[in-house]
């Protein structure tokens, strides 16, 4: 995940390790460009959402990622139910919760995303799922391709990427 984050920000990472001397990790990022102009109006700061508010089931075991994603989703006008694992997500669905979309972390303890997805599909065959992963590899691609209405969402993601994925669902 660290490598993916560094790469997403056009950075470089160098790891040096010597037995008995420890490990040194150097991370370099490019210099930031000039700060863009500040918005002149409230409308520029908080544009009207282009989609209806969605009921989002957010499933991620990393509390920092969960909190930041929750904040983004709420800023976009969505109602979020957040849980820390697949088992809790399935319990919500079994209790009758009907989300418009599920954001499902691929790598979690317990069932994880790959184990949760088939059970989720049995409970709700058509709900769109954004399968979030810091490592888009063949396994993640195969899991997503093996189920209908599943899209891979590469971590780290920001507001724009998330909004882009949610807009078609909100229009539906």
Image (cartoon, rainbow, N blue to C red):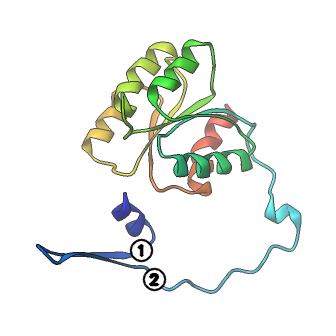
Quick one: 68 or 146, which is closer to the camera?
Answer: 68
Quick one: quadrant of the N terminus?
Answer: bottom left
**Label 2 element class:** loop
- Whether residue 20 can be seen here: yes
| x, y percent for residue 74 | 71, 45
Q: At 62% across and 35% down in the image, what residue appears?
A: 169
Quarter where residue 21 is shown: bottom left
Q: At 62% across and 25% down in the image, what residue appears?
A: 99
Quarter where residue 51 is shown: top right
* Rendered image: mark on residue 77: none
Please give left or right for residue 71 compared with residue 33 in the image.
Answer: right
Label 1 crowd (10 A; few <14 / some 14-19 / many >=20): few
Label 2 crowd (10 A; few <14 / some 14-19 / many >=20): few
Q: Can you identify the residue that label 1 sits on?
A: 10
Q: At 69% across and 36% down in the image, what residue appears?
A: 171
CA distance for labels 1 and 2: 7 Å
Quick one: quadrant of the C terminus?
Answer: top right
| x, y percent for residue 115 | 35, 26
Quick one: 86 or 144, which is closer to the camera?
Answer: 86
Please give left or right for residue 113 compared with residue 171 in the image.
Answer: left
Precedes in sequence: disc 1 or disc 2? 1
| x, y percent for residue 95 | 60, 13
**Label 1 element class:** loop
Quick one: 84 or 151, which is closer to the camera?
Answer: 84
Q: At 61% across and 42% down in the image, what residue appears?
A: 166
Q: Can you identify the residue that label 2 sits on?
A: 30
- Tell me whether circle 1 and circle 2 mark residues in contact (CB < 8 Å): yes
- Whether residue 147 can be seen here: no
């Amino acid at each position: 995940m660290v490598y993916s984050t560094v790469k997403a920000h056009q950075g470089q990472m160098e790891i040096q390790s010597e037995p008995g001397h420890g490990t040194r990790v150097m991370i370099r990022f490019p210099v930031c460009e000039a700060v863009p102009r500040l918005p002149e109006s409230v409308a520029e700061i908080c544009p009207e959402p282009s989609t209806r508010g969605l009921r989002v089931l957010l499933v991620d075991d990393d509390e920092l990622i969960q909190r930041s994603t929750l904040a983004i989703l709420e800023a976009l006008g969505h109602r979020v139910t957040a849980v820390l694992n697949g088992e809790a997500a399935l319990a919500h669905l079994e209790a009758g919760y009907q989300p418009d979309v599920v954001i499902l972390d691929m790598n979690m303890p317990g069932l994880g995303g790959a184990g949760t997805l088939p059970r989720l599909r049995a409970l709700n065959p058509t709900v769109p799922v954004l399968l979030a992963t810091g490592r888009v590899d063949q396994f993640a691609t195969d899991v997503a391709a093996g189920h209908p209405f599943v899209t891979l969402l590469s971590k780290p993601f920001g507001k724009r990427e998330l909004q882009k994925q949610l807009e078609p669902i909100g229009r539906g």
